Image (spheres, rainbow, N blue to C red):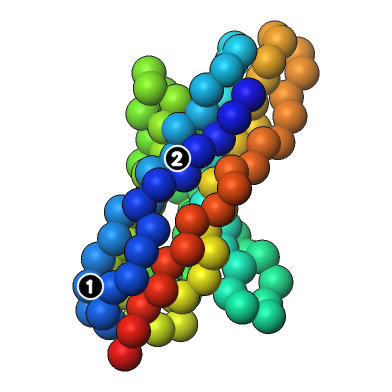
Amino acid sequence: VQLVESGGGLVQAGGSLRLSCTASGTIVYIDDMAWYRQAPGGQRELVALITSGGTTNYADSVKGRFTISRDNAKNTVDLQMDDLQPEDTADYFCRSEIFVTADMGVDYWGQGTRVTVSS
């Protein structure tokens, strides 16, 4: 199983970016899918999560600006980021709980994609 992220880059404050993450390999079922971020010198933190049923949860710092969505048929999870601010600068990581058999779920992580917001 592999998670591959795309969509990072450099943007000015107030701008938008859309991150995408695609899971591939032997996949029976994907439960939670989430985006995390880690700023330079900081700890990795949860940004947004979406359950298999579509329930979402956001960090307070991104509520109203970021939107997480998923396509279960394509095994993808996206993060639409609007009104980006310099404090959103970080490496963004996709995580998914993937069942490779009917009863074994494992957390997989992507390699990360960098988002840089200039003031």
Location of residue 28 with respect to 49 vertically, above or below:
above
Mark 1 or mark 2: whose residue is earlier in sequence: 1
Residue 40's spot in the image, x, y percent?
A: 61, 78
Residue 11's spot in the image, x, y percent?
A: 28, 73
Q: Quadrant of the C terminus?
A: bottom left
> How many dots with numbers?
2
Residue 48's spot in the image, x, y percent?
A: 49, 55
> Residue at (39%, 58%) from the top-left corner?
8
> Residue at (36%, 64%) from the top-left corner?
9
Picture quadrant of residue 69: top left
CA–CA distance in space, label 1 to label 2: 20 Å
Asked if the residues shown at circle 1 and circle 2 are in contact, with their CB atoms under 8 angstroms apart, the answer is: no
Picture quadrant of residue 46: bottom right
Q: Helix or strand or loop: what does disc 2 sit on?
A: strand
| Residue 23, numbered label | none
Task: Give the residue type that dot 2 points to.
Answer: Cys
Tell me the residue that label 1 is attached to: 15
Location of residue 34 with respect to 58 vertically, above or below:
above
Q: Is residue 67 visible?
A: no
Tell me the residue that label 2 is attached to: 21
